[in-house]
Amino acid sequence: MPIKAVLLVGGFGASNYLKERLRGAVDQKVQIMQPPNAWLAVVQGAVMKGLAQNSPDKLTMVRVQNRKARKHYGTEWRVRYDEKLHANLRNKKHWCGLDGCWKVYTMEWFIKRGDSVSENEPFFTSFVWTGPVPQGRIKKVKMDIYSDRTPRDAPLTRDDNVPLLCHVEADVSHIPEHLLQRRKGTDGQVSNCETHCSCSGFMWTWRMLTIWAVVLRTELQD
């Protein structure tokens, strides 16, 4: 969604220097608005919300109708190699003995810029971790979460504009052995497979385990 105007509020928002610097930094089509008494806007808004919550029947309730993600959020994941989609990653493909195919690492975006998000309703997505049985059962699940800081469509792969946002780690050793699924790969090797459900937003959930990702929560609320 293109930006049409910038509204300056708060104490520093009344600065003419700030206004002129912004005017020179943004597109000329974007209007720089500096309302009178802008320094009171933050305080007035907080007071209005507090009064409305205290007496919702008498005063108009101040609500945030919806939130939009300002960035893409996701993790790096292995997918089946597709020559039409991954031709530029041909030299990075590797053989997967479990599935019997070539695979490459690409970005799995579970939230994209512009998606509706909520601080109270996490977005769920599922992942599968596998490991050869001779190496023992999977005891820890680790995941790096990235965000894209540029105003572009979600990229296929990670680059310098997709920095690490946070690292989450879960101890899943308490999950009973008999609940783990096993698969025999095309290479004849048997692997443990654990299916986990994670949710993006402010909370990350694995089966029988919850991890709070404070960094991601803060990013979505800003």
Image: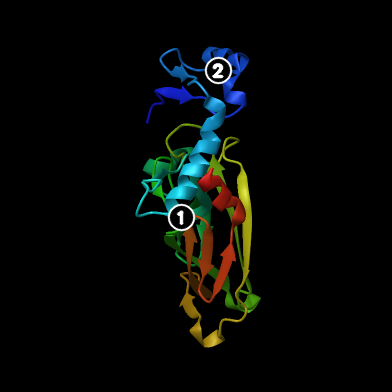
Which residue is drawn at the image coordinates 41% and 54% (left, top)?
A: 55
**136 sits left or right of 66 in the view:** right
Circle 2/circle 1 CB separation < 8 Å: no
Taking depth in this image into account, of 109 and 183 the one nearest to the observer is 109
Residue ranking furthest to the front:
58
Taking depth in this image into account, of 158 and 45 the one nearest to the observer is 45
How far apart marks 2 and 1 lie (CA) works out to: 38 Å
> Which residue has dot 1 on it?
54
> Which residue has dot 2 on it?
22
Quadrant of image for the N terminus: top left
Q: Is residue 132 above or below residue 58?
A: below
Q: Is residue 86 above or below residue 21?
A: below
User: Residue 109, can we see it?
Assistant: no
The kind of secondary structure element at disc 2 is helix
Amino acid at circle 1: Asn
- Residue 41: mark in rendering: none
Q: Is residue 45 above or below residue 215?
A: above
x, y percentage for residue 199?
47, 61
x, y percentage for residue 93?
52, 49
Amino acid at circle 2: Leu
**110 sits left or right of 75 in the view:** left
Q: Earlier in the sequence, mark 2 or mark 1?
A: 2
x, y percentage for residue 190?
52, 77
Quarter occupied by residue 21: top right
